[in-house]
Image: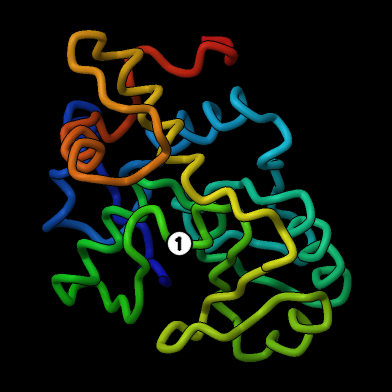
Amino acid sequence: CAEPEDPIYGTAQSEVNVSTYVTSGCSTSVVVGLSKQIAEEIGCMNPASLTKFTAGGNLTFTSTAVLPYMSAAAKTALAKVTQNNTIQVNSGFRTVAQQYLLYRWYQQGRCGITAAATPGRSNHQSGRALDIANYSSRITAMANQGWSHSVPGDPVHFDYLASPDIRGKDVLAFQRLWNRNHPNDRISEDGAYGPQTEARLKSSPATRFAVGPTCVGA
């Protein structure tokens, strides 16, 4: 799941679609703008689903691809770990747009990705998973606060399974955003990742939709 260092992109990326990055780049920072809209839409649907967290003290983010959201219970458990341990987060909450790219890169054997769940199935999409850069020295500290470390081939990955499983909420959020921006090309708002949703995701703007979450100020 780990992502390499962020490359530097010019302003031209504002006009490109998600599918542009299937064969280029190795950082999901290219879809962070769209991903933030998806996270905000989840907040509109259910304000208690995700909570924000920030870097500081013993907690650092290793790249701009990190979205600062997770479940409230996972946030509390992580805070207890960072009271006495430094934690370097590669990835926290991840949207369907980010997971789509990571899975495609994994399928192609690119970017050094050793494991990736199919879009819609990752615990990252539920806000209850973390990828940690300094994982090897933090396994015990994380386990003491309820974090599981058991995904084969993905040593950086930790799950907080006591949090609610909200996988599919990000897919639903994307579907709602797509329909809001494409009233003449609507798709089912069912939270299920399938061919219709994937086709629209691939053609979506990487940075953001023109019309975002209606409960968030412009």
Percent across and percent down for residue 186 are 25, 18
Taking the image as shown, residue 76 lies to the left or right of residue 217, namely right
Please determine whether, in this image, residue 22 is positioned above or below residue 139: above
Front-most of residues 142 and 14: 142
The residue drawn where x is 18% and y is 44% is 195
Please determine whether, in this image, residue 83 is positioned above or below residue 19: below
The residue drawn where x is 71% and y is 63% is 59
Query: Which kind of residue does numbered mark 1 sit on?
Result: Ser
The residue drawn where x is 54% and y is 70% is 131
Please determine whether, in this image, residue 49 is positioned above or below residue 217: below
Please determine whether, in this image, residue 192 is positioned above or below residue 93: above
Percent across and percent down for residue 132 are 57, 73
What residue is shown with label 1? Answer: 122
- How many numbered tags mark residues here? 1
Front-most of residues 158 and 28: 158
Taking the image as shown, residue 43 lies to the left or right of residue 34, namely right
Could you say whether the residue bearing mark 1 is in a helix, strand or loop? loop
The residue drawn where x is 55% and y is 28% is 40
Percent across and percent down for residue 203 are 16, 33
